[in-house]
Amino acid sequence: MKNALCLFAVLCMTCGCFFAAAAESPEKGGSMAENTEGEVKLLCLNIGKADCLLLFCGETRWLIDTGYEQNYNALETALAQYGVDRLDGVFLTHCHDDHEGGLLSLARSDTIVDAWYASSVWYDVKENKHPAIRAARECGEEAVLLSAGDVIPAGGGASFTVLGPLRTDEKNENNNSLVMLFSSPAGSILLCGDMKTEEEADLLAAGNIAPCTLLKAGHHGGKNTLSDPFLAAVRPEAAVISTSTAEEPDTPAPSTLRKLENAGCAVYVTQDFRDAVLFTLSGGKVADVEDISWNGVPPRFEGLTMDIRFETDTVTLTNTAAASVSLDGYTIYSTKGDETLLLEDLTLAPGESRIIGGRNASVPVDQTWDEKYVWSNKKRDVGILYDPWGRPVAAAENGLPDD
């Protein structure tokens, strides 16, 4: 198992916590409020189940996870909306594709990344295949592998402190998640990746957990996270959960939501917002929570449905809305097969359906997916339809259990 630690000095920004707004700011049901001195902002993208967070403090900008590969257009849109062409650092919490999928695309983009960070421990990934190591190498750099106790200055008296992981979990990569406390004069944010109760227990036993202003909940708010002792130690004012119930029906778990509610914590789930949710921290409090919609980008098309039939190896797309929709540039993704299809020359009138099938589809299809078999006929498979901006607009399952 990889335990090498490649630390080097991090450039410190001597700036006050002032967030320079982009020339065109995204809308929050109108216009976005001006940013003022002494604030920190955390932008959490609504890209389905996947995690992608953009943190602003002073003149520094930090990215925590990049979502799926097929979500990259959404990340690119977010960076453009806020005028971000340089990132002080990119953190990969752990080696799962809903967190690391956009790393290589980011490394190959015009966005400058000053440093690539990841946990010093991980499971079941060869070092030369590690997503953060590959992304850094793509830019001619080395990834910085972090261990508990490491501190990354963020300027203006702010910093990231690595709390965990404290050991390697060789059964569940979620418990190798990089867990960090972002601290600043404006407030603190506990960033949990996909940490589950086992890693929570490790950090509690070591005395590494302290109260925070805002909690980024672990593991998409699933039932095996946010134990009562953990919440008692953290005592957050607010919590954000990155997930999509359509993709992961057991998230956010009702039991997790109840625990947060009983702890007196305001809860925000990314799927309940348009393109993103923006938190503003000031004076040690959550000063504002904004529903963000991108400027110059059409809203997500509502009314598209999917129906997967593994028996015929097809997916049917139906437009239930009152307006026609062009699906040029939309993509369909199969989670089990990790396969993506770009749709072209496909328009759906109101009430109209189209059938997409693999090469061996047993019924006539309107477009062929150039795969022998697309949908698993043995285990649970989820299909997700993304628009050209990387936003999920529909999802469906093949109806089979995980096991």
Image (spheres, grey):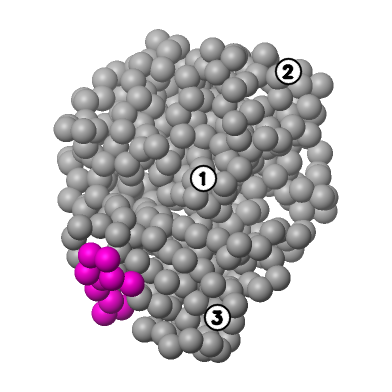
Q: Secondary structure at mark 3?
A: loop
In the rendering, at what x and y percent does residue 323 appear?
Answer: 18, 60
Q: In the image, which residues are magenta?
A: 344-353
| Residue 312, label in figure | 3
Dot 3 or dot 2: first in sequence order is: 2
Q: Is residue 215 above or below residue 140?
A: above
Q: Secondary structure at mark 1?
A: loop
Q: Mark 3 and 2 residues: CB-CB less than 8 Å, in contact?
A: no
In the rendering, at what x and y percent does residue 26 appear?
Answer: 23, 39
Dot 1 or dot 2: first in sequence order is: 2
Name the residue beneath numbered marker 1.
245
- What residue lies at 59% left-to-right and 14% top-to-bottom? 263
Q: Secondary structure at mark 2?
A: helix
* CA–CA distance in space, label 1 to label 2: 26 Å
In the rendering, at what x and y percent does residue 162 appear?
Answer: 65, 31
Q: Mark 1 and 2 residues: CB-CB less than 8 Å, in contact?
A: no
Q: Residues within 10 Å of mark 1 (few under 14, many from 20)?
A: some
Amino acid at circle 2:
Pro
- What residue lies at 49% left-to-right and 50% top-to-bottom? 246
| Residue 148, label in figure | none
Name the residue beneath numbered marker 2.
229
Q: Is residue 35 above or below residue 107?
A: above
Amino acid at circle 1:
Thr
Q: Residues within 10 Å of mark 2 (few under 14, many from 20)?
A: few
Nearer to us of marks 3 and 2 is 3
Dot 1 or dot 3: first in sequence order is: 1
In the rendering, at what x and y percent does residue 396 appear?
Answer: 50, 60
Using the image as rendered, state which of residue 147 and residue 378 is in the foreground.
Answer: 378
Q: Residues within 10 Å of mark 3 (few under 14, many from 20)?
A: some
